[in-house]
Amino acid sequence: IYKFLLENENGALAAPRGHGKSSLTGIIFLIFNVVNKREQYIVYVSQNHSKTVQFLDPIRNEFKENTLLRFVYGNLAPRAAKDDTGKDREDCFDTKGCRIEAVSFEKNLRGFKWKNIRPTLIILDDIEDDMRVLNPELRVKDENKLNKIIIPSLDINGHYKFIGTILHHDSLLYKKIKQLNGKIYRACDPDFKHILWPDR
């Protein structure tokens, strides 16, 4: 999974729930990108508003309270971004010259921009809903949102990583895995005598 994340190109990966993919991607990989100044503007997209806002708290805590991280990389205290009225925004913050913004896939998205910069990295984490994916019309609507609004909002040299659990044979994630030659990981068998290798 680390190799998949560190490749500087678009990618899609599926794994069972509880596999740790969100922690690896949304915390470890994201922090790695910030402290090593690999990305300027990271947009994290999840299924709904509550999930996206909850995602930011552990990141903030690591930057504030991880003493080893601060010892190695200096002051990483995040600064709250302001809205048009001057109030702190709950959905994004800035640290070490990088903006991290959390966005709900359910929202009516219209692209992203910060200081005339478009996202250099978009992380799509379990953006599909268990019920919506069963409806063919909603699947088309969600596919249009991803392909016509979210992905085109990337910087010219930007890329996206799409992770999640496959909910349907015609799901967005499954289509992107086929398109990008991504990977599908399976869980261990019940007696843990062997591991089922990735499909690809």
Image (cartoon, grey):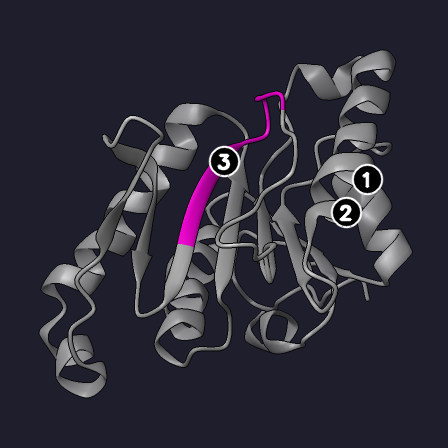
Mark 3 nearby-residue class (10 Å; few <14, some 14–19, many ≥20): many
**Numbered disc in front, either 1 or 2:** 2
SS state under label 2: helix
* Residue annotated with mark 3: 103
Instruction: Give yes or no for contact between labels 1 and 2 (Cβ–Cβ under 8 Å).
Output: yes
Q: In the image, which residues are magenta?
A: 100-108
Q: Would you say 176 lies left or right of 52 here?
A: right
152 up-or-down from 84: above or below: below
SS state under label 3: strand
Q: What residue type is labelled 1?
A: Asn
Label 1, label 3: how far apart the Cα atoms are: 16 Å
In the rendered image, residue 19 lying in the magenta stretch gets the answer: no
Query: At 41% across and 56% down in the image, what residue appears?
Result: 99
Q: Which amino acid does label 3 sit on?
A: Val
Name the disc covering residue 112, or none. Answer: none
Farthest residue, direction bottom: 72
* Residue annotated with mark 2: 152
SS state under label 1: helix
Name the disc covering residue 147, or none. Answer: 1
Query: At 52% across and 62% down in the image, what residue appears?
Result: 192
Label 2, label 3: how far apart the Cα atoms are: 16 Å
